[in-house]
Amino acid sequence: ALDLARWGVKDAAGLAFLDPPPAGALAEARSLLARLEVLDGQGVLTAHGEALSRLPLPPRLAHMVLAAAARGQAERAARIAVLASEPGLGGREVDLRLRLEALERDRGQRARAARSLAGRWAAQTAREAGRAQGEPLDDGLLMALAWPERVARARGPAGHFQLAGGRGVWLEETDPLARDSWLAVGELGGGGRADRILMAAPVQPADLERLFAAAIVREARIEPGPSGRLRAVRIERIGRLVLREMLDEAPSADLIRAALLDQVRADGIAGLPWGEAGRALRARADFLRGLGEADAPDLGDAALLEDLDAWLGPALAGLRSLSDLSPARLEGALAAHLGHAAQRRLDALAPARWTAPTGNSFAIDYAAPGGPRVEVRVQEVFGLSTHPAVAQGRAPLTLALTSPAHRPIQTTRDLPGFWRGSWREVRAEMRGRYPRHVWPEDPASATPTARAKPRGT
């Protein structure tokens, strides 16, 4: 990726590779070069990248040594680069500082050659960097320049850390570095569920914050407080690692609303405090869609989640918890989402209530098995010679007829057929059980009533 950038190539697809590089790996390589300030936002080599490309080092190490040279630390960084390039050089201690000391003391041929190589790298890098300026960096910070995603923070038992990239790593709990809270990791081994730290150095979060100021992510997270009310936690982090966390007991209304909407997305539409009216409204719309009504609104879970901000967001104004959302407010939000025209169309085709011949109205249960259903006392449908229906007559209501004591006596979708058929047997039984009520022989022509017979009749 670095060579392509030097040649001015932004799209490798047009090159005649014998073995084309995997697209994903090449994209990740370019992303790394951008993080190392080698490429700009358009994928063009920067001045830093030009200087880096002339060094006989891998990009990570070249970036570290070049950045260190700008602070007058070319020699120190070059020795760290040598240790990272030569396994076992400087011993097997995990602490980078101890390895650097061992490399300095070692009079063997390999160590002398490594120091000489580091000197040449340092001299060349110093020429590329020019005049030194800026404050020197600790060894851990120098190493973090090469592997910023390997900055690690202690978590859990002693010796266990999490990398900025999210992966868990570890070292022996008896190692002195196991007591540090933050490390810069330069070498890992293992490859299982958690890699072992083989080379590292301690760092301070305040120093990391200064060094990687441009990479720090600042965000606000909403979480329940001790009272159950939402509060904001403002976070500054490097990758997955939190540098600073501050409580905000008075978060903005927009932040709270966004958090509540996210909670609905996580819990699902069914988790909202639906009341009877809200559930009925959704059932009515679903009923019409089941009939194939072209203009029927979609109030299903998926549709409501897709448009969640638009219909539910305004209803959350002033709330600090979903438990504060009343069923009436939720129903109002849904009705507003429908709009006046769609609400009128819904009321016309799938009315919420049905009016009996007595003038009393009864809720229609559109979610009932077998279609829309109404429970009504049989005396209130006397005089009804045609079966009631909704959706312009396309869907007959299921009438659950009850006795004066509201006990079921018949369920029908053909009321005239019931009058002509089994009414005789029902009438005989009801007259004996409820003698104070009217039980006509011809209910289709009788006067409907919601009352018992007057006394003395």
Image (spheres, grey):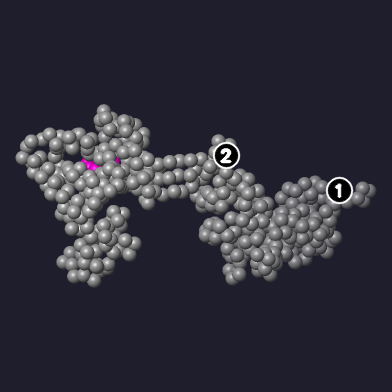
What is the secondary structure assignment of the residue under circle 1? loop
Left or right of residue 300, residue 414 in this image? right
Report the residue at 21% width, 67% height from top. Answer: 7
* Residue carrying label 1: 436
Q: Within the image, what quadrant is residue 398 found in? A: bottom right
What is the secondary structure assignment of the residue under circle 2? loop
Query: Which is nearer the eye, 19 or 455?
Result: 19
Please provide percent x and percent y for residue 44: 28, 64
Is-magenta flag for residue 188?
A: yes
C-alpha span from label 1 to label 2: 56 Å
Query: Which is nearer the eye, 177 or 229?
Result: 177
- Dot 1 alpha-carbon crowd within 10 angstroms: few under 14, some 14 to 19, many 20 or more: some
Looking at the image, residue 55 lies above or below residue 103: below
Report the residue at 82% width, 47% height from top. Answer: 434
* Residue carrying label 2: 228
Prevalent SS, magenta region: strand
Amino acid at circle 2: Gly
Residue furthest to the front = 131
Amino acid at circle 1: Arg
Query: Which is nearer the eye, 182 or 260?
Result: 182
Q: Nearer the viewer, mark 1 or mark 2?
A: 2
